[in-house]
Image: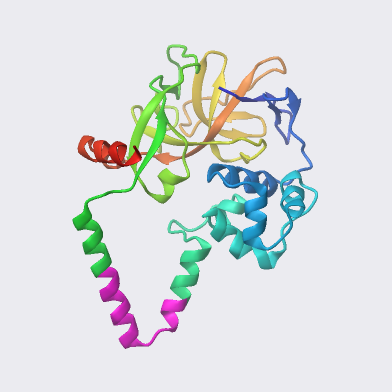
Amino acid sequence: MPRRKIDSFPAGSASIIDMRTGKPAASDVPAICGRIRSFREKIGMGQKELAEKLSVSANAVSNWECGRGRPDLSLLPLLCDVLGVTFYDLFGTKGPSLQYTAGEQILIDKYRDLSKGHKVAVNRMIDTLLDVQAAENVPLIRELVYYGKALSAGPGDPTEFDDEGEPIYLYASRQVDRADCVFTVNGDSMEPKYHSGDMVLISRIPDAPDLQFGEVGAFIVGNETHIKVCQADGLHSLNPAFAPMKFSDDTPVYLIGRVMGILDPEQIAKEADVEKYLAMKG
């Protein structure tokens, strides 16, 4: 599995090496550029197709992703809508707990302009569609990868992140749709937010340095995997009883991805629904 190496943690910065090339990730490329490419590739869309949907040239999209240019502000709502993300996702900032895609926000704005009677009609139509959807009993399911070897959130048995994992089927949600894999937390160094045994959703980061200082990430240090807060001087725990993990220049530290949150066990698809999903998939 490709990994990106955090070579060291000098004051004020962390050096991240792209394991596919063995070279340092360009520090002058804005993080938004990597995110555009990441979100585009995640939905299986080519640069040319994205350019056509935005009515720009393929070279323009290539320049954005290489850091040679930025999309015009007027294009951002459509860009977010095409990629199926929010402004907060695109810029890597924390938004309110309830987030909307650009398309959803447009629908909300249109709904607000409706008369009271027309709002009633829309509400009834939505209720009818939800009833039909429930009657069809075809839930949306996402297939992610589950790594059974626990992430160590404190001292524990060494584990090597070399297994290919196994499929895990989850009911679709905004958080699930943004994740790529699932790990199980082992240890109490990230309490009170993350407890031993919690399953966490991880979004792989194909273009370092997409993880910002202060964000929680999944890392490999030596033969152990950890979830920690990435800071300029090392990896920190949320539990004050645990000292920060600091490293010398020759200590390999690999970034797996960003921790999106804790997986609610109710989001794990029931066996009958998985069978329907696999049958529909072919």
Residue lying at 73% horizontally and 22% vertically, measured from the top left: 22
Looking at the picture, the colour scheme in use is rainbow
Q: Assess whether residue 124 is covered by the magenta stretch.
A: yes
Q: Main secondary structure of the magenta part?
A: helix
Question: For residue 120, what is the image quadrant?
Answer: bottom left
Residue lying at 46% horizontally and 20% vertically, measured from the top left: 164
Q: Position of residue 19 (x, y in %)?
A: 67, 24
**Extreme-front residue of the structure:** 282
Q: Nearer the viewer, residue 262 or 70?
A: 70
Question: For residue 254, what is the image quadrant?
Answer: top right
Q: Is residue 57 left or right of residue 3?
A: right
Q: Nearer the viewer, residue 6 or 267?
A: 267
Segment tinted magenta in the rendering: 110-127
Q: Is residue 188 above or below residue 87?
A: above
Residue 104 visible in the picture: yes
Q: Nearer the viewer, residue 132 or 245?
A: 132
Q: Is residue 183 left or right of residue 132?
A: right
Question: For residue 212, what is the image quadrant?
Answer: top right
Q: Position of residue 110 (x, y in %)?
A: 46, 78
Quadrant (top left, top right, bottom left, bottom right) of the C terminus: top left
Q: Position of residue 15 (x, y in %)?
A: 72, 29
Q: Position of residue 154 (x, y in %)?
A: 45, 21
Q: Is residue 124 left or right of residue 201?
A: left
Residue lying at 27% horizontally and 66% vertically, measured from the top left: 129
Residue 185 visible in the picture: no
Q: Could you tell me how many numbered marks the image carries?
A: 0
Q: Assess whether residue 160 is covered by the magenta stretch.
A: no
Quadrant (top left, top right, bottom left, bottom right) of the N terminus: top right
